[in-house]
């Protein structure tokens, strides 16, 4: 019996989901077999060991399954053919073919141990193990960002070198008889407890400017311009701009943010580059405004303090704690049918993680920007979408009649659009919505007041909107449980 197209797609999707579960086996088995045979070459063993040959056979079989499932997994996730994916896919397929050849030829060589081909077989096995390791590295880079492994490796090497230098310096001081007097901590009981004082006045920097608040003034800028690739669980290139400690820590002589020195801070350097420069950030979409760049510079000059927030990750959407369920074949078919349709408009639809039943739709990079009509086409996926990113789109207030149908949403971004109070009134009726970004929109105090009715709301960004300080103050009185980021207080 011939399967219906939807059923066939559902089974191919299932095959694709096996990829994360099986990909480690051929890598581990191939590398272990290579190590065993390397030791065999040192001992001058005549041919492939039974253990190595068995491992190669198992690795070859599982590698075929891994390559096949990986192909369908990429198709299901609708990933564009990036360089990493191209290399990961074809080096993986080549490694699977080599493992099959090695398994067959190894069996022949083992049956004739006196053949001179044992050395060539071992060299081919080592090359295959290297290919397996490299394709695994590429896969990790696609999931966790470039440099996922190498950044940690270089950090470990740097720290080891630093420890060795410190140890050598201490040994040299000991030989020269140099004794350092340790700092003696003052006992807690000896510290005078200051009397309560009234709230401190606004702190001024050396230039006479008021202190920049990281969570209320800098985080909204990063959210609007950087977190698409470098925040909320996405760390492209290994860059974590949702982690204050990561940003302000030196790595291989470079700083994302060097406290007190904006000229040495890559964050500033890259957002100030001309749009034609390959290193300019953000790489697409609107440029960071000169006013926002000046604010970031002033924050860095003032010491890049995190204020009361340890990391802007504290205002992330906690997407990984969402409940999961098994999607039915009909649901999978619906998603697969709509995903390429939205891709034509520049809208990506993908699960939050491999195998997740919770999806994200991202229209922020669409060119030209999508409008209300394209958002309406997403309604068929409303049951699965928990994150909807409409930043920089050409939507109007009329889009609210469509958005209200996305009752599974936890996070929505409509920043840098013409949306305003009518959309806010619609969002106030959502049941699960926790985070809304109204940065640089037409939102006024009236729309802000309507959002006090949204009981599930936890974070609200209204930086550069048409709201007033009085409206923000009243919102904070009405909803003290919501973190309001408006850049005013």
Image: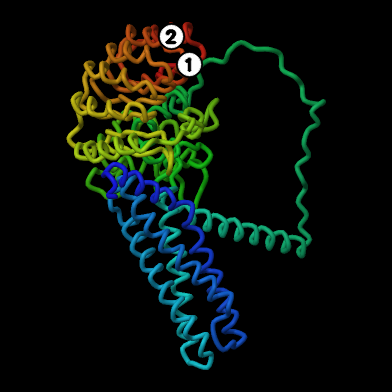
Say which element carries label 1.
loop
Residue at x 33%, y 26% (from the top left corner): 382
Residue 170's image quarter?
A: bottom right
Q: Is residue 460 above or below residue 159?
A: above
- Could you say where residue 281 lies in the image, as x and y percent from the top left? 32, 42
- Could you say where residue 183 lies in the image, as x and y percent from the top left? 75, 42
- Could you say where residue 249 lies in the image, as x and y percent from the top left? 52, 44
Residue at x 51%, y 87% (from the top left corner): 111
Q: In this view, does 484 lie to the left or right of 34?
A: left
Residue at x 37%, y 58% (from the top left corner): 68
Q: In this view, does 146 lie to the left or right of 418?
A: right
- Given residues 327 and 45, the one toward you in this image is 327
> What residue does disc 1 label?
482
**Are the residues tagged 1 and 2 within 8 Å (C-beta)?**
yes
Q: In this view, does 423 lie above or below 73?
A: above
Residue 43's image quarter?
A: bottom right
Q: Is residue 171 above or below residue 21?
A: below
Residue 219's image quarter?
A: top left
Q: Residue 475 carries which label?
A: 2
């Amino acid at each position: 019996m011939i399967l219906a197209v939807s059923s066939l797609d559902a089974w191919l999707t299932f095959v694709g989901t096996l990829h994360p579960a099986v990909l480690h086996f051929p890598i581990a088995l191939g590398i272990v077999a290579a190590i065993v045979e390397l030791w065999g070459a040192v001992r001058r063993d005549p041919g492939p060991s039974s253990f190595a040959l068995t491992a190669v056979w198992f690795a070859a079989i599982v590698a075929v399954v891994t390559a096949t499932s990986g192909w369908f997994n990429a198709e299901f996730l609708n990933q564009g053919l990036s360089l990493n994916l191209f290399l990961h896919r074809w080096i993986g397929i080549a490694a699977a073919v080599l493992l099959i050849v090695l398994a067959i030829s190894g069996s022949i060589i083992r049956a004739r141990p006196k053949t001179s081909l044992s050395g060539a077989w071992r060299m081919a096995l080592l090359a295959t193990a290297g290919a397996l390791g490299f394709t695994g590295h590429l896969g990790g880079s696609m999931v966790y960002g470039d440099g996922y492994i190498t950044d940690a490796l270089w950090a470990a090497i740097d720290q080891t070198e630093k420890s060795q230098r410190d140890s050598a310096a201490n040994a040299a001081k000991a030989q020269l008889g140099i004794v350092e007097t340790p700092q003696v901590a003052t006992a807690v009981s000896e510290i005078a407890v200051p009397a309560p004082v009234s709230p401190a006045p606004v702190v001024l920097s050396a230039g006479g400017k008021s202190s920049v608040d990281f969570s209320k003034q800098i985080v909204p800028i990063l959210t609007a311009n950087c977190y698409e690739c470098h925040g909320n669980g996405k760390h492209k290139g290994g860059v974590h701009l949702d982690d204050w400690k990561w940003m302000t820590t030196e790595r291989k002589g470079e700083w994302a943010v060097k406290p007190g020195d904006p000229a040495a801070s890559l964050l500033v350097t890259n957002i100030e580059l001309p749009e034609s420069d390959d290193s300019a950030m953000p790489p697409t979409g609107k440029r960071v405004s000169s006013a926002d760049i000046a604010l970031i510079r002033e924050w860095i000059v003032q010491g890049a303090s995190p204020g009361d927030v340890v990391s802007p990750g504290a205002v992330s959407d906690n997407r990984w704690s969402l409940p999961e369920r098994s999607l039915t074949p009909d649901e999978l078919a619906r998603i697969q049918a709509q995903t390429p349709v939205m891709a034509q408009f520049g809208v990506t639809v993908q699960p939050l993680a491999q195998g997740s039943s919770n999806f994200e739709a991202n229209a922020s990079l669409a060119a030209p920007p999508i409008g209300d009509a394209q958002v309406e086409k997403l309604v068929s996926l409303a049951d699965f979408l928990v994150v909807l990113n409409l930043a920089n789109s050409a939507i109007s207030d009329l889009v609210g009649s469509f958005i209200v149908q996305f009752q599974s949403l936890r996070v929505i971004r409509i920043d840098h659009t013409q949306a305003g109070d009518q959309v806010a009134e619609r969002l106030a009726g959502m049941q699960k919505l926790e985070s809304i970004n109204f940065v640089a929109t037409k939102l006024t105090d009236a729309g802000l007041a309507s959002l006090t009715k949204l009981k599930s709301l936890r974070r609200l960004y209204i930086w550069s909107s048409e709201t007033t300080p009085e409206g923000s103050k009243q919102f904070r009185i009405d909803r003290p449980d919501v973190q309001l980021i408006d850049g005013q207080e």
